[in-house]
Image: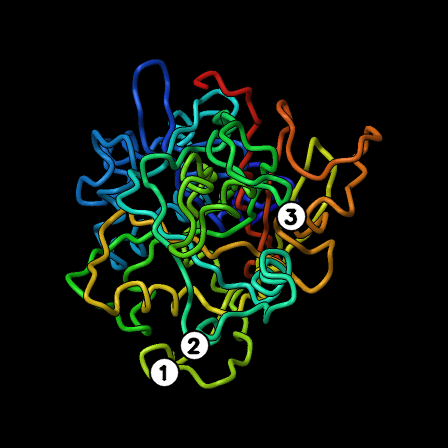
Amino acid sequence: MSGAAWLELADGDPFGVENLPYCSFGQDRFRWTGVRIGDRVLNLAAAEGRGLIDAGGAFLGQGNLNRFMAAGRPVWARVRERLSELLSAGRYQEAVEPLLLGVADVRLELPFEVADYVDFYSSLEHATNLGQLFRPGAEPLLPNWRHLPVGYHGRAGTVVVSGTEIPRPYGQRKSPDDDAPTYGESRRLDIEAEVGFVVGVPSDGPIPIDDFRAHVFGAVLVNDWSARDLQAWEYQPLGPFLGKSFRTSISPWVVPLDALDAARVAGPPQEPAVLPYLRAGEHYGYDIGIEVFWNDTLVSRPPFSGMYWTPAQQLAHLTVNGAWARTGDLYASGTVSGPDPEQTGSFIERTWNGARPIQLADGTPRSFLLDGDTVSITATAPGPGGARIGFGEVTGTIAKNTFE
């Protein structure tokens, strides 16, 4: 049994009371906010309407988490403590049980309205690998990489929830054999396994690095789909554009930062020393273990604990120029990769740009994604008392493009 007293959860259930990730879900034409416990979802609007929780009306009539995320850490902490009590103490079973729905019986929606989307490039191994592939013979890391968290602004309007079909993008491509670029569908469609962080409390300017927890509500899994042939042609001199902006998938569950306290680990040494605004009182990341499945074949286990730049450093850098943060801002870590091929978070690295194809379980060799392929990314982290914290999964299937 897990820590929930009256809910019969299996030992090791990654969605016990130690986790309690939030979501948005639909039934018929209605949308509600919820929290997951085991294989069920508690309707938070109904719980608040019946006086079981007090979130200042943040859940009533809301189809996403934005109002609750904007309420701030004291409200988050109070609601989390109350939810743990409701789902643990047997005296609440009669009142709470009617408000629980099966995860399989609801339609999971985008959990928050995405205000803005930024993607970073924070894995030393990933940046080194792509530097070798995109700039052969040159220094893999550009001079600025160890001084600041490199990133780019993506497109908030094409962030979609797990399970949404991914149409193959079109654009300009150029191979070494072409004298000029050609237009057509991407032939080198790829993934990027990442962890994203969601801003709850907005700011009117820079967020000091030690205020990270006061502003960030929680974390999601991210697949930043990437068209490598479009990217390779367009990314110089200004960086990613159409090769990245067509779709970004996120998991439906937002894991609260408080659920990840037991997963905090020391951040890696940074040389040369970073500038003062990037120096935290506690330099830490998170021990999140990611798994990547390609058509149900496990092909990689990227380790988030080794990311060179931490989520707190990313947020501090994102706002240091005076840009404000808004409720619903999503910023992603960049591809998570470790030192071994089996730890890489993209297929361009895993197959070394197609030179070393992966053998899937059905016997087919693959380098880049074909129409009909499905990619699922899952993750867990250590929780208190030996519990595991689950992120669920972010899944997408490649569809034939219908708008050529």
Residue 90 at x, y percent in the picture: 46, 40
Marks 2 and 3 sit apart, C-alpha to C-alpha, by 26 Å
Labelled disc at residue 398 = none
Q: Is residue 388 left or right of residue 150?
A: right
Q: Which quadrant holds residue 269?
A: bottom right
Q: Residue at x 27, y 73 (%)?
A: 208
Q: Residue at x 62, y 55 (%)?
A: 289
Q: Residue 275 has which mark? A: 1
Q: How much space separates mark 1 and mark 2, taking CA atoms? A: 8 Å
> Which of pointers 2 and 3 lies earlier in the amino acid sequence?
2
Which residue is most to the front? Answer: 179
Nearer the camera: disc 3 or disc 1: 3
Whether pointer 2 and pointer 3 mark residues with C-beta atoms closer than 8 Å, the reply is no
Q: What is the residue that sits farthest to the right in this orientation? A: 363
Provide the residue designation for mark 2. Answer: 147
Q: Is residue 215 visible?
A: yes
As shown in the figure, which amino acid type bears the numbered disc 3? Ile
| Residue depicted at x 59% and y 56% | 134
Q: Which mark is residue 348?
A: 3
